[in-house]
Image (cartoon, rainbow, N blue to C red):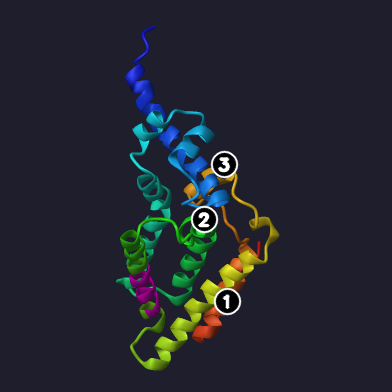
Amino acid sequence: MRVDLQASRRAAAPDTRRRILAVALELFSAHGYAGTSMRDIAEAIGMTKAALYYHFASKEQLLEAATEPIRTEMAAMLQLAAGPPPPAPEQVLTRLVDILSRHARLIGTVFDDPSSGDRGHRQEQQLAAKEVFRAIVSALAGDDRPASLIRARCAVGAVLFAVRVTMNHDPRLAEPVLSDQALRLLGGEEHALDVAVRQEIVAAALRALGEPAARPARG
């Protein structure tokens, strides 16, 4: 039976790219973005630099691919917050906590690393994040009264602070990510916070907003 080598290589390419991204995230987590070279990534994955450059032309392009999942989800978050129809506050806060919980390790590994990306790229990321959070605050406030906006900002601040501090106090999250975990991180497949903690964060944010929290469903 004749094997179509080109078709086989095309089918394997996505898996190879995913494996490269996983190893890159593992190295970024351990050594930082600036402390990791393309040679380091190639050696860790067991391929030549030329083979690595076939999949990713630069470390910057690799970083773009690694952060694409969270950028895609934040764009969807912006669409939800901006409406129409106007979303319920609990829906917005639950979605925000969900995104942060599933991508918290990626945020800590890449976005919080001051060496990741050039100045222009970092400014672009910051502007995009500000746009999303402005839309979230507006959706939570419901109107432009100063008191409403303050409560909405407090609710968002409660979520961001609670997620960050809870993670910082969890010893399981103190170690650099490993390749198998990095693979799950790429697709946002693994929560950093369990469901009970996420529900408590949403409830606290709703209280800051002056909204009652829905009771968790009984199993």
Q: Which region is colored magenta? A: 129-137
What amino acid type should be assigned to the residue bearing mark 2? Thr
Does residue 134 appear in the picture of this structure? yes
Please give the residue where the numbered disc 1 appears in the rendered image: 203
Q: Dot 2, how many residues are within 10 Å of its Cα: few (below 14), some (14-19), or many (20+)? A: many
Label at residue 88:
none
Quarter-wise, where is residue 79 in the image?
bottom left
Question: Residue 95's x, y, as percent?
Answer: 47, 65
Please give the residue where the numbered disc 2 appears in the rendered image: 109
Closer-to-camera residue (38/85)? 38
Residue drawn at the location 53% of the way across and 35% of the way down: 44
Q: Are marks 3 and 2 in contact (CB under 8 Å)?
A: no
- Circle nearer the N terminus (1, 2): 2
- Circle nearer the N terminus (3, 1): 3
Quarter-wise, where is residue 142 in the image?
bottom left
What secondary structure is found at the residue carrying circle 3?
helix
Q: Is residue 136 magenta?
A: yes
Does residue 19 appear in the picture of this structure? no
Gap in Å between the C-alphas at discs 1 and 2?
28 Å
What amino acid type should be assigned to the residue bearing mark 3? Ser
Q: Dot 1, how many residues are within 10 Å of its Cα: few (below 14), some (14-19), or many (20+)? A: many
Quarter-wise, where is residue 192 in the image?
bottom right
**In the depicted structure, whether residue 79 falls above or below residue 68:** below
Mark 3 vs mark 1: in front = 3
Label at residue 179:
3
Gap in Å between the C-alphas at discs 3 and 1?
34 Å
What amino acid type should be assigned to the residue bearing mark 1? Ala
What secondary structure is found at the residue carrying circle 2?
helix
- Circle nearer the N terminus (3, 2): 2
Position of residue 213 in the picture relative to residue 119 (left or right): right
Residue drawn at the location 50% of the way across and 78% of the way down: 157
